[in-house]
Image (cartoon, grey):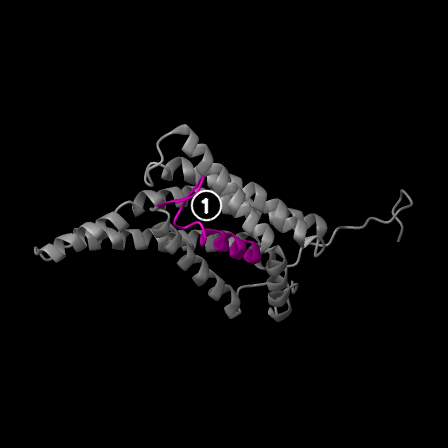
Amino acid sequence: MPSPSGSSTLSKPAPRFASIGSPYFGIMLAVMAVVLILSNIGASKGVVLGPIITDGGFFLFPLAYILGDVMSEVYGFKVARKAIITSFALSVFASLCYWVIIILPGFNDDYGTAKQAAIEGALGPVPQIVLASLLAFLAGQTINSWILVKMKARTGEKSLWARLMGSSVVGEFVDTLIFCSIAASVIGISDAGSFVNYVLVGFVYKTAVEFLFVPITVLVVGWIKKREPSYGVS
């Protein structure tokens, strides 16, 4: 029936999401956690590629954001936040394990001493890297997921490309700035010029990778939506 003003009141449909009862969410969560742990180890090494300064985890980390985009789009903000917190809890656990491994007494021969030094050099800086990742990834991924879901509430199932790209720009910038500010000293960056290079290269690289993978991310999102029996079921 028409409203008193003579026009019908139309409400915008709520965005569609899936529950986490199927195995797909568990698989993506496991991959995200492994990628994050490996990225934290790789990030303790500074990498110089000509004029470009980055860290050893540069080729892994964007994958975690792509997985975050998929989970946010398919399962919603609350589920994506749960994945972020779970991944970091596992990362903290891994860091504690590294600490125990380092302090355990080893062999006193030349090989044992060299091995101990190598382990300390490889895993020793990781706790500070984990702290950087905790703050950066938590802030960046949360903002990324929140923006994506808010945009979905406005556009529905349309404009997935715009959601993925728009949320990634903001999330990656926040993530990169926080991470680089904390982790720079661990990988040996001490002057302002190198720090700016580190931030800009990290942001541009991560964002560019996400943009390049948007077509694949769209296909993965569509594939999972079709196979999630609960997607769009209230």
Verify whether residue 180 appears in magenta: no
Highlighted range, magenta: 46-71
Image position, residue 90 (x, y; %)? 36, 56
Whether residue 177 is visible to the viewer of this picture, yes or no, is no
Judging from the image, what secondary structure is the residue with disc 1 in? helix
Q: 12 or 122, which lies in front? A: 122
Say which residue appears at 51% left-offset and 41% top-offset.
203
- Say whether residue 209 is left or right of residue 99: right
Verify whether residue 70 appears in magenta: yes
Say which residue appears at 51% left-offset and 64% top-offset.
25
Residue that extends furthest to the top in the rendered view of this protein: 192
- Say whether residue 97 is left or right of residue 215: left
On screen, residue 234 above or below 134: below
Say which residue appears at 45% left-offset and 46% top-offset.
137
Whether residue 25 is visible to the viewer of this picture, yes or no, is yes
Residue bearing mark 1:
138
Image position, residue 45 (x, y; %)? 34, 46
> The disc labelled 1 sits on which kind of residue?
Leu
